[in-house]
Amino acid sequence: MTLPDLISIAVYVVILFSVAWWASRTDRNQERSAKDYFLAGGSLPWWAIGSSLIAANISAEQIIGMSGSGFAIGLAIASYEWMAALTLLLVAKFLIPVFLNKGIYTMPEFLEKRFDSRVRLLMAVFWLGVYVFVNLTSVLWLGALAMHTVAGTDMFWGMLLLALFSLLYSTWGGLKAVAMTDVIQVTCLVGGGLLVLGLALDKIADGQGLLAGWSLLLERAPEKFDMILASDNPNYASLPGLSVLIGGMWIMNLSYWGFNQYITQRALAAKSLPEAQKGILFAAFLKLLMPLIVVLPGIAAFVLHPDLPKSDMAYPEMMKLVPPGLLGICFAALIAAIASSVSSMANSVATIFTMDIYRVRIRPKATDRELLVSGRLAAILSVVLAMLVAKPLLGELDQAFQYIQEFTGFFTPGVVVIFLTGMFWARTTANAALAATLLSVLASLVLKLAAPMLPFMDRVGLVFLLCLAAVIVISLLERRQPSDKAIALREINFATTTAFHIGSAGVVLVLVALYATWW
């Protein structure tokens, strides 16, 4: 790090906190409400929603983890990004209209409105556990790993700096501060990521330019450009062939993009339904771009440094190519991605704990001020706990991204089943939803132990079918008439604009072209 690098980072920090302060302003005599803090007062425009969705998603576990998987597996790991673009279109068209119609703060709150308080509490506890012990830990640990590799920062102090930086503006300003600063974060992320990729390609070509580097990358690592892996591929267990197109990846993506609090919370804070749908469409287009930033640098690292001791060292190694003066920009981009995700996850922990547990179970008559204090304390405690458990959980892993996907795969089949059947099948009962939630974990564990060679993505698909069958059978045995809590689909506006249709068609055509090229 040179002086110009440090100046770049300092300028980034000043701009970020200035925007957070501006977004957090309230009238002098106006007290901030819970809706202001947790849902930005329902005021987010489409460009903030789209940027914030990507900023919340692309963090250390994406940049470091997916680059590591790009190093080990290749472009096939980009299916997580490209199939997510298609999933986002479905979320905008069919799911967000239901959530906005119900006027909810959280995903567990929707489950109580559709089922009962037992389902709400169970899923609130589940999401709090996943956010703290999987998401926050991975973001902080991999972010500190990147700082250690690039700047020599001690791992613990790296996590502490990231945590303090993220919490300083998010715990005070709430979701609006997070979303507005995410616009800056995404700009830094895309710019810095493309700079790293460009320098890596130029290095491969010995200074002959990007196109020459791209051609050599294809020539020297052709095995890294198979999008659909054959069964004899050593990485088939991670990405089992056509399952990325028609199998378990759909379940993973629907759970993440459709029913995940720290993702859907942005759309719940939209000015209107059309504004939310435009923002999600914008995020889908950005998703098409992400493999350039999070996967190709890993493949470039495989060509330049095939003997790296750990796959997750690929992206930090590529950052070393950035010359003095520009390294600060790329480092700021990496910090931007990490800080955005930490702040987003902490804000969602605060929202779920406060609105689903504190307000419902502990203090039903809490004032807005008490709810804000509860949320801020929950956010701080969640990050502290994540820091304490990060090393024991992730310290010895080679590909953290794959670990995260497999762990969450124990729960996601049940999550997707209870939401989809709850939204679109009027007979679904609360007992059936509870059974599916518990069966998801139990069946996943049994299959993991009994058939360890079964790819986890295929396991997710099989468990989804089991949970779906369980919901259908139990619901039919319990009730022959639609539930009085069923979603009145006829009252919900699922119409979308012509611009949304054109944009969606563009996303689909790009995806078809990508898979046709590297089938």
Image (cartoon, rainbow, N blue to C red):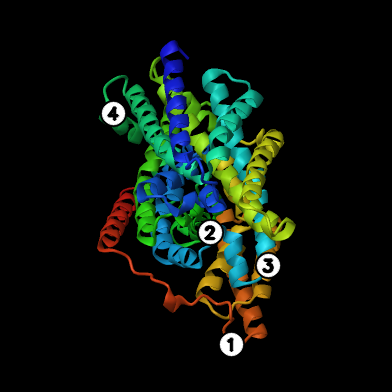
The kind of residue on which mark 4 rests is Leu
State which tag comes first along the sequence, 2 or 3. 3
Q: Which residue is mark 4?
A: 210
> Are discs 3 and 1 less than 8 Å apart at CB?
no
From the viewer's perspective, is residue 270 above or below residue 135?
Answer: below
| Residue 117 disc label | 3
Seen from this angle, which residue lies furthest bottom? 480
Farthest residue, direction right: 362
Q: Which mark is residue 481?
A: 1
Camera-side mark, 4 or 3: 3
Q: Is residue 140 above or below residue 489?
A: above
Front disc: 4 or 2: 2
Residue that appears at 47% across and 57% down: 268
Is 231 above or below relative to 157? Answer: below
Kind of residue at disc 1:
Gln
The answer to the question of whether label 1 and label 2 lie on touching residues, with beta carbons closer than 8 A, is: no
Q: Which residue is mark 2?
A: 259
Say which label, 1 or 4, has the lower sequence index: 4
Where's residue 397, x and y in %?
63, 36
Number of marks in the rendered image: 4
State the separation of the CA atoms marked 4 and 3.
Answer: 56 Å
Within 10 Å of disc 4 (Cα), the crowding (few <14, some 14-19, many 20+) is some
Q: Is residue 192 left or right of residue 423?
A: left
Mark 4 and 2 residues: CB-CB less than 8 Å, in contact? no
Closer to the eye: label 2 or 3: 3
Whether residue 199 can be seen here? yes
C-alpha separation, residue under disc 3 versus residue under disc 1 = 21 Å
User: Type of residue at label 3?
Assistant: Ser
Other residues around mark 2 within 10 Å, as few (<14) / some (14–19) / many (≥20): many
Q: Nearer the viewer, residue 201 or 40?
A: 40
Q: Nearer the viewer, mark 1 or mark 4?
A: 1
